[in-house]
Image: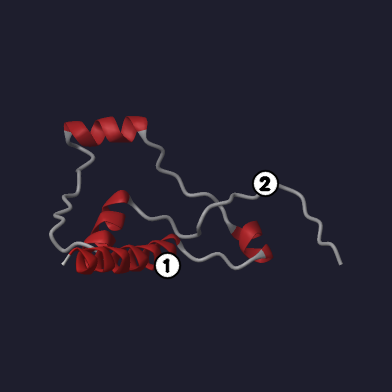
């Protein structure tokens, strides 16, 4: 049977994640040599980033009621694991 609904569906992963968290996760899984540095909101660069980047979280309640959606961290972790494996395979084929 067809399910109908009304309203806006925000097609995003639940549980927002910051750029700093993404880079830390990348470091943990893919490349331990990456050295992420948080950017303070009171620094000049932080002020520019705040002025030009959207920091918002969209409601995913309706989307999650229709289908299971992994969190942003779960999706990133899965893809970083894939990336790590591909890098290791490429490195071993070079040797």
Which residue is under mark 2?
Answer: 8
Label 1–label 2 contact, CB within 8 A: no
Q: Secondary structure at mark 2?
A: loop
Residue 57 location in percent, x, y? 47, 49
Question: Residue at the location (33% across, 68% down)?
Answer: 81
Residue 42 location in percent, x, y? 19, 37
Q: Quadrant of the C terminus?
A: bottom left
Classify residue 89 by image quadrant.
bottom left
C-alpha gap between disc 1 and disc 2: 24 Å
Badge number at residue 66: none
Q: Secondary structure at mark 1?
A: helix
**37 and 34: which is toward the camera:** 34
Which residue is under mark 1?
Answer: 74
Figure disc tally: 2
Alpha-carbon neighbours of circle 1 within 10 Å: few (<14), some, or many (≥20)? few
Circle nearer the N terminus (1, 2)? 2
Question: Residue at the location (25% across, 32% down)?
Answer: 47
Classify residue 46 by image quadrant.
top left
Residue 4 location in percent, x, y? 81, 56
Decide: is 79 above or below 40. Answer: below
Residue 77 location in percent, x, y? 36, 66
Decide: is 12 above or below 47. Answer: below
**27 and 14: which is toward the camera:** 27
Q: Quadrant of the N terminus?
A: bottom right
Indicate left or right for 32 with 15 as reference. Answer: left
Classify residue 69 by image quadrant.
bottom right
Seen as rendered, the residue at the extreme right is 1
Question: Residue at the location (20% across, 44% down)?
Answer: 39
Indicate left or right for 1 with 95 as reference. Answer: right
Foreground tag (1 vs 2): 1
């Amino acid at each position: 049977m067809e399910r109908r609904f009304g309203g806006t569906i925000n097609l995003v992963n639940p549980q927002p994640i910051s750029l700093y968290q993404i880079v830390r996760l990348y470091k943990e899984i893919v490349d331990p040599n990456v050295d992420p540095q948080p950017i303070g909101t009171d620094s000049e660069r932080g002020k520019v980033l705040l002025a030009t980047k959207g920091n918002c979280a969209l409601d995913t309640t309706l989307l999650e009621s229709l289908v299971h959606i992994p969190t942003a961290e779960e999706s990133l972790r899965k893809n970083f694991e894939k990336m790590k494996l591909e890098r290791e395979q490429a490195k071993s084929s070079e040797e």
